[in-house]
Protein backbone atom coordinates (compact mmCIF):
# COMPACT_ATOMS: atom_id res chain seq x y z
CA UNK A 1 0.00 0.00 0.00
CA UNK A 2 1.19 3.51 -0.83
CA UNK A 3 -0.24 6.91 -0.13
CA UNK A 4 -1.88 8.95 -2.88
CA UNK A 5 -2.23 12.70 -3.41
CA UNK A 6 -5.72 13.57 -4.63
CA UNK A 7 -7.68 16.47 -6.09
CA UNK A 8 -7.54 18.97 -3.21
CA UNK A 9 -3.82 19.47 -3.96
CA UNK A 10 -4.42 20.79 -7.50
CA UNK A 11 -3.48 24.47 -7.72
CA UNK A 12 -2.55 24.55 -4.02
CA UNK A 13 0.67 22.56 -3.73
CA UNK A 14 1.28 22.97 -0.03
CA UNK A 15 4.55 21.17 0.67
CA UNK A 16 4.40 20.52 4.41
CA UNK A 17 3.82 16.87 3.53
CA UNK A 18 6.98 16.56 1.43
CA UNK A 19 9.13 18.07 4.17
CA UNK A 20 8.26 15.28 6.63
CA UNK A 21 8.64 12.35 4.23
CA UNK A 22 11.54 10.22 5.50
CA UNK A 23 12.22 8.61 2.09
CA UNK A 24 11.83 11.51 -0.36
CA UNK A 25 8.82 9.91 -2.06
CA UNK A 26 7.22 13.20 -3.14
CA UNK A 27 7.55 14.54 -6.66
CA UNK A 28 6.76 18.11 -7.68
CA UNK A 29 4.74 19.14 -10.69
CA UNK A 30 3.85 22.66 -11.80
CA UNK A 31 0.69 22.81 -9.66
CA UNK A 32 0.40 19.42 -7.95
CA UNK A 33 2.45 17.01 -5.86
CA UNK A 34 2.52 13.26 -6.26
CA UNK A 35 3.86 10.35 -4.24
CA UNK A 36 6.03 7.74 -5.90
CA UNK A 37 4.40 4.43 -4.90
CA UNK A 38 7.72 2.62 -5.28
CA UNK A 39 9.37 4.92 -2.73
CA UNK A 40 6.53 5.36 -0.24
CA UNK A 41 6.99 3.28 2.92
CA UNK A 42 3.45 3.83 4.22
CA UNK A 43 4.61 5.70 7.31
CA UNK A 44 1.58 8.04 7.39
CA UNK A 45 3.71 11.08 8.34
CA UNK A 46 2.47 13.17 5.42
CA UNK A 47 -1.26 12.77 6.00
CA UNK A 48 -1.59 15.02 9.03
CA UNK A 49 0.67 17.66 7.46
CA UNK A 50 -1.62 18.30 4.47
CA UNK A 51 -3.80 21.35 5.21
CA UNK A 52 -6.31 20.44 2.47
CA UNK A 53 -6.59 16.73 3.39
CA UNK A 54 -5.50 15.56 -0.05
CA UNK A 55 -3.50 12.45 0.98
CA UNK A 56 -5.00 8.98 1.48
CA UNK A 57 -3.80 5.39 1.66
CA UNK A 58 -4.44 3.89 -1.77
CA UNK A 59 -7.11 1.57 -0.37
CA UNK A 60 -9.01 4.47 1.23
CA UNK A 61 -9.09 6.99 -1.63
CA UNK A 62 -12.65 8.31 -2.01
CA UNK A 63 -14.39 6.73 -4.97
CA UNK A 64 -14.66 9.99 -6.92
CA UNK A 65 -10.85 10.33 -6.78
CA UNK A 66 -9.78 6.72 -7.43
CA UNK A 67 -8.32 7.78 -10.80
CA UNK A 68 -5.68 9.69 -8.82
CA UNK A 69 -4.08 6.35 -7.88
CA UNK A 70 -2.99 5.73 -11.47
CA UNK A 71 -2.30 9.43 -11.95
CA UNK A 72 0.14 9.45 -8.99
CA UNK A 73 1.98 6.44 -10.43
CA UNK A 74 2.24 7.96 -13.90
CA UNK A 75 3.23 11.45 -12.78
CA UNK A 76 5.74 10.14 -10.22
CA UNK A 77 7.49 8.41 -13.09
CA UNK A 78 7.24 11.46 -15.34
CA UNK A 79 8.54 13.78 -12.60
CA UNK A 80 11.11 11.29 -11.25
CA UNK A 81 13.87 13.91 -11.27
CA UNK A 82 11.73 16.48 -9.41
CA UNK A 83 12.06 15.16 -5.87
CA UNK A 84 10.79 17.60 -3.28
CA UNK A 85 11.75 17.17 0.36
CA UNK A 86 11.39 20.64 1.84
CA UNK A 87 8.71 23.20 2.46
CA UNK A 88 8.38 25.85 -0.23
CA UNK A 89 5.73 28.53 -0.63
CA UNK A 90 2.34 27.27 -1.74
CA UNK A 91 0.97 28.57 -5.01
CA UNK A 92 -0.18 32.22 -4.86
CA UNK A 93 -3.92 31.47 -4.90
CA UNK A 94 -3.68 28.24 -2.88
CA UNK A 95 -6.13 29.28 -0.18
CA UNK A 96 -8.72 30.23 -2.80
CA UNK A 97 -8.21 26.98 -4.75
CA UNK A 98 -8.39 24.91 -1.58
CA UNK A 99 -12.13 25.58 -1.44
CA UNK A 100 -12.85 24.48 -5.05
CA UNK A 101 -14.02 21.11 -6.32
CA UNK A 102 -13.62 19.35 -9.67
CA UNK A 103 -10.09 20.59 -10.31
CA UNK A 104 -8.66 17.76 -12.44
CA UNK A 105 -8.93 19.77 -15.65
CA UNK A 106 -6.57 22.35 -14.13
CA UNK A 107 -3.81 19.88 -13.26
CA UNK A 108 -0.69 20.74 -15.25
CA UNK A 109 1.52 17.81 -16.13
CA UNK A 110 4.25 19.70 -17.96
CA UNK A 111 6.56 22.44 -16.80
CA UNK A 112 6.58 25.41 -19.14
Image (cartoon, helix red, strand yellow):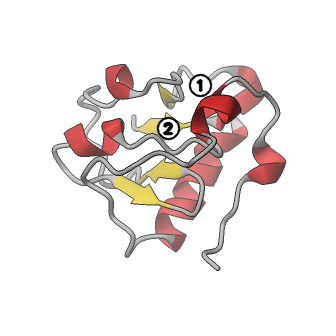
Q: Position of residue 31 (x, y in %)?
A: 60, 55
* Mark 2 burial class by Cα count in 10 Å: few <14, some 14-19, many 20+: many
Q: Position of residue 75 (x, y in %)?
A: 56, 62
Name above or below for residue 48 compared with residue 37. Answer: above
The percent position of residue 92, horizontal first and vertical second, equals: 57, 47
Give 35 or 83, whichever is nearer the viewer. 83
Q: Quadrant of residue 47?
A: top left
- Relative side of 67 to 9, left or right: right
Q: Tell me what residue is drawn at x 40 percent, y 48 percent.
A: 89
Secondary structure found at label 1: loop
Name the residue at 24% across, 44% down.
Answer: 19
As drawn, the residue found furthest toward the bottom would be 112
Residue 4: which numbered mark, if any?
Answer: 2
Q: In this figure, which residue is indicated by the disc labeled 1? A: 61
Question: Residue 95: which numbered mark, if any?
Answer: none
What residue sits 71% from the left and 54% below the top?
107
Amino acid sequence: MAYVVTEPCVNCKYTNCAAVCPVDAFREGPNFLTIDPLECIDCDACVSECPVEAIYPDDEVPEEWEHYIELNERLAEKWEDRIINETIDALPDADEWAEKDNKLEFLQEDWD
